[in-house]
Amino acid sequence: MHLILIRHGQSYINLPDWDGGYIDTALTPLGQAQAARVAAWLAGHVAPDAIYTSSMRRAVETATAIADALGMAFTRDDRLREIGNAWPDGSPLDVTQHAPEYAEYWASERPFAPVCDGGETWGDFLTRVGRALYDIAERHPAQEDTVLVVAHGGVINAAVDVAFNVGHWRSLDAWLHNTSLTHLEYKPEKHRQEIWRLHGLNLCYHLAEPDGSLLGYTWKGRTPGGQ
């Protein structure tokens, strides 16, 4: 199975001046443009067998653009929600209107401590993402199957950690652009320990602009196309 993990488009919660709390927000106009770009690129290059998405609004809006471009339906999965948006048992935490109080430490810094009062830990998060990952692999066992998963930066990092057996303690965070693609292949074979292959991380073909910049991304201190 080929698994393409797609981060959602830019949402209002991603804006540096957002002060509305960590709630479930919609895509910004830029995020909608990014979603349209990735949808068009996928429609021209990939023929997926299924689409799964996080149940959070920014992911669902991105998945909707992709599914419409491909003429497909998608399946919502609460286990694909971003870190801190579920209870320890994996059930979704309601962040539609009010944001919970999150801890000041980064989740993976203290992997066995709740990221919010009564909420999940980084360890719980790895478990729910891992279960989703392997459930999808079981549903699509054929080597030629291709599955799209629309989720969040934390989910994609956790999926890579699970696939490569990183464990609870991590020293690297893959900083993923909005709507970037991460391509994993699940290839269980007898007499081989390695069952996951990483083909690409943070791929952004669809965001390329004529001047060589990426839509919605700038190097610190530089404008798109700047020298």
Image: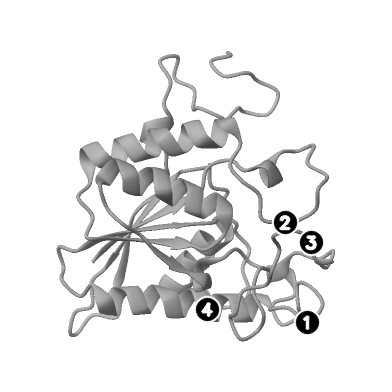
Q: Nearer the viewer, residue 204 or 60?
A: 60
Residue holding disc 4:
128
Tag of residue 99: 3
For disc 2, the neighbor class at 10 Å (few under 14, some 14 to 19, many from 20) is some
For image coordinates 36% across by 34% down, the residue present is: 205
Residue 165 visible in this rendered orientation of the protein: no
- Structural distance between the alpha carbons of marks 1 and 2: 17 Å
Closer to the camera: disc 1 or disc 2?
A: 2
For disc 1, the neighbor class at 10 Å (few under 14, some 14 to 19, many from 20) is few
Q: Are marks 1 and 2 in contact (CB under 8 Å)?
A: no
For image coordinates 66% across by 68% down, the residue present is: 85
Left or right of 201, for residue 186 = left
Q: Secondary structure at mark 1?
A: loop
Q: Are marks 2 and 3 in contact (CB under 8 Å)?
A: yes
Residue holding disc 1:
118
Left or right of 216, for residue 194 = left
Q: Is residue 181 above or below residue 78?
A: above
* Type of the residue with mark 4: Arg
Quarter of the image for the C terminus: give it. top right
Q: Are marks 4 and 2 in contact (CB under 8 Å)?
A: no
Residue holding disc 2:
23
Residue 93 is situated, as x and y percent measured from the top left of the image, at 67, 72
- Structural distance between the alpha carbons of marks 1 and 4: 16 Å
Q: Nearer the viewer, residue 170 or 89?
A: 89
For disc 4, the neighbor class at 10 Å (few under 14, some 14 to 19, many from 20) is many
> Nearer the N terminus, badge 2 or badge 3?
2
Closer to the camera: disc 3 or disc 4?
A: 3
Closer to the camera: disc 1 or disc 3?
A: 3
For image coordinates 19% across by 85% down, the residue present is: 191
> Nearer the N terminus, badge 1 or badge 2?
2
Quarter of the image for the N terminus: give it. bottom left
- Structural distance between the alpha carbons of marks 1 and 3: 14 Å
